[in-house]
Amino acid sequence: MTNSISPSGAALRGAVDLSALVQRQAQGADGGQGAHSAPRSSDQIVFETDDAAFGSTLELSRTVPVVVALWATWSEPSKTLLAALERLVRARAGRLVLAAADADRSPQLVQAFQAQSIPTVVALVAGQPVPLFAGVQPDETVDQVFDQLLELAGQHGVTGSIETGEPPADGDGAPAEPVEAPLPPLHQEAYDAIERGDFAAASSAYRTAMAQDPRDALAVAGLAQANLLGRLHGKTLDSIRSAAAAAPNDLAAQLDVADLDLSGGHVDDAFDRLLTLFPDLDADGRKLVRERLVELFEVVGTDDPRVAAARRRLTNLLY
């Protein structure tokens, strides 16, 4: 993790594709919180976000830089950091906003931001991620990071203010050009469906996109992630793990844990669980596990080295 930002265009990309997070990502292990379509707070400067509300948070970052704090109720350091972040963000008079995401209710964000510990702090600028730091940091360090974040945001035309309501402007005072092109219609349909928690509709939209263009790799990945969301939606971490512990030979329960592990960023654990089960399964069970693995490979990204290793292992088991 880094304690500073490189104020360059490259810093907006990194290893995380957040357009894919909203199109493709999905998670539902928040106990049914998916009905929310916007950050749940009347405060525009400091508010909550989660997997379901993230689309609105991402869109806000096109106007004002968003500091995203991944925290947890069980983590005392994260509570300490949240209080400091709120104080320092409010001191910026609306030029920054703070979105607090409970990691236990936002496993997809934890995965997308590749958080290795809690608390972890990242930023969003023009819909793109900027890694900031992990753990509690001195106020002076956070202030320096925020200065660099505002400088980077200015370079990308994100100069709005929540308190004044001013839109981002270019040097002539005119609204900045959009950073990204609009999504294709079916991808937008899936995006909207995920935002309202209708993962079946999102999957349907992605299937239609694939039928129209079988080479649409984002639709393939989007379908895999929408399916993941749908499978986990309404379930809780405790219920999934308890069911798997109580029935270690129940394939459906083990598949649920693999989904949960992968959605929380434990990619190797998810793959290993299914690949370890594979040799002892009957033909139907093997078919189900192979299909689930192929889908999870799409969620992680087929160019990910962890996927390549798991795919080789699966091939050896098959032949």
Image (spheres, rainbow, N blue to C red):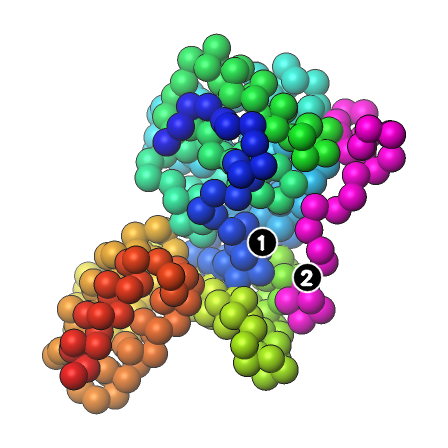
Q: Which residue does the image show at 50% across and 39% down from the upper left?
A: 101
In the image, taking residue 315 as reference, residue 112 lies left or right, namely right
Residues at circles 2 and 1 in contact by the CB criterion of under 8 Å: yes
Compared with 33, 231 (above or below) is below
Residue 85 in picture, x, y percent from top left: 52, 22
Q: What amino acid is at disc 2? A: Leu
Q: Is residue 151 visible?
A: yes
Q: CA distance from mark 2 to mark 1?
A: 9 Å
Q: Which residue does the image show at 80% across and 32% down from the upper left?
A: 170
User: Is the residue marked by circle 2 packed among few (<14), some (14-19), or many (20+) residues within 10 Å?
Assistant: few
Residue 210 in picture, x, y percent from top left: 57, 79
Which quarter of the rendering shows the N terminus? top left
Q: Is residue 250 visible?
A: no
Residue 113 in picture, x, y percent from top left: 44, 44
Instruction: Assign a secondary structure to mark 2.
Output: loop
Q: Which residue does the image show at 87% across and 30% down from the upper left?
A: 172
Question: Is 184 within the magenta?
Answer: yes
Compared with 175, 211 (above or below) is below
The one of 307 and 40 positioned closer to us in this rendering: 307
The one of 158 and 286 positioned closer to us in this rendering: 158
The one of 6 and 132 positioned closer to us in this rendering: 6
Q: Earlier in the sequence, mark 2 or mark 1?
A: 1
Q: Quadrant of residue 313?
A: bottom left
In the image, taking residue 167 as reference, residue 196 lies left or right, namely left
Look at mark 2 in the image and give the residue it sits on: 183
In magenta, the rendered stretch is 160-189
Residue furthest to the top in view is 140
Q: Give the prevailing secondary structure in the magenta stretch.
A: loop
For residue 226, the mark is: none
Look at mark 1 in the image and give the residue it sits on: 19
